[in-house]
Image: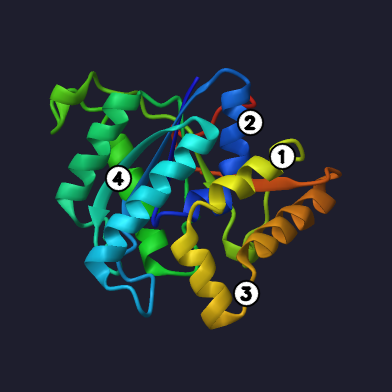
Amino acid sequence: MNILAIGCHPDDLEIGCFGTLAKYIKQGHKVSVCHVANGNMGHVEIMPEELRVMRFNEAEAAARVIGADHYAIDIPDIHVTAHNDQLVYDLSRVMRKTQPDLLITHYEQDYMNDHIQTFYSAFRASFAASIPHFHGNEAGPSVPVGPIYHMDTVAGVGFIPTEYVDISEEIDLKLEALSCHKSQIQWMRDHDGIDFLDFVRTCSRVRGYQCGAQYAEGFRPNLNYLRLTAKRLLP
């Protein structure tokens, strides 16, 4: 299968689903990751343009850790909206290039608007990419409307998984990829007193307790028409 994971900021996918993506790759599937926002506001001291470049490079490095292809849309933080037609055009081009059999993205009740709008942008683009004469047909053929899985929220707040993926064998790789985001991890340690690698490990452990695994990631399928399937698509 071809899997496309669309996150808002650089590091969102690493937090929410990189263990699952690493597992897909181990099983021989093709995985692509795409972040929509460039993360340029994610630091107190580093200025936005410098941070934008830094965070792109961190996301590139993280994708290499698990062997995924990496795409970026480059929307400034706090400016992500599903009403942005150009964003939808750009995401539909990524979809035509990657030809996903399923999408993984944020939950529609996530904790911040940029995350919520990333889901709605991906939802809108995934339908648009199925229309042969829509923008971006130079990037590849149209893509059938397919399943979407919502990844966990940060700390699991307000999110009750209906499906789990055992990432016990992938947890170290997940954290290695997350550790590529040095600008964020160091900033949270210095300014917020949070060891984010330990934070993410602990959240994965909690999901593991819920499903009888050592470590796990939780998901919910999107329940809209044409998004459901009788097949188990998560690894």
**Which amino acid type is marked by label 2?**
Lys
Residue at (53%, 37%) from the top-left corner? 65
Give the spatial CA distance, label 2 vs label 3.
27 Å
Give the spatial CA distance, label 4 vs label 2.
22 Å
**Which amino acid type is marked by label 3?**
Ile
Give the spatial CA distance, label 3 vs label 1.
23 Å
**Disc 3 target residue:** 194
Horizontal and vertical percent position of residue 51: 31, 64
Give the spatial CA distance, label 4 vs label 1.
26 Å
Please report whichever mark, 4 or 2, sits nearer to the chain's N-terminal start: 2
Please report contact status of discs 2 and 3: CB closer than 8 Å, yes or no. Answer: no
The quarter of the displayed image where residue 66 is located? top right
Please report whichever mark, 3 or 1, sits nearer to the chain's N-terminal start: 1
Horizontal and vertical percent position of residue 152: 59, 54
- Horizontal side of 176 relative to 13 (left or right) equals right
Horizontal and vertical percent position of residue 220: 60, 46
Above or below for 153 versus 57: below
**Disc 1 target residue:** 167
**Disc 4 target residue:** 72
Residue at (13%, 33%) from the top-left corner? 135
Residue at (67%, 64%) from the top-left corner? 199
Please report whichever mark, 3 or 4, sits nearer to the chain's N-terminal start: 4
**Mark linked to residue 23:** 2
Residue at (83%, 43%) from the top-left corner? 213
**Mark linked to residue 224:** none
* Mark 1 element type: loop
Please report whichever mark, 2 or 1, sits nearer to the chain's N-terminal start: 2
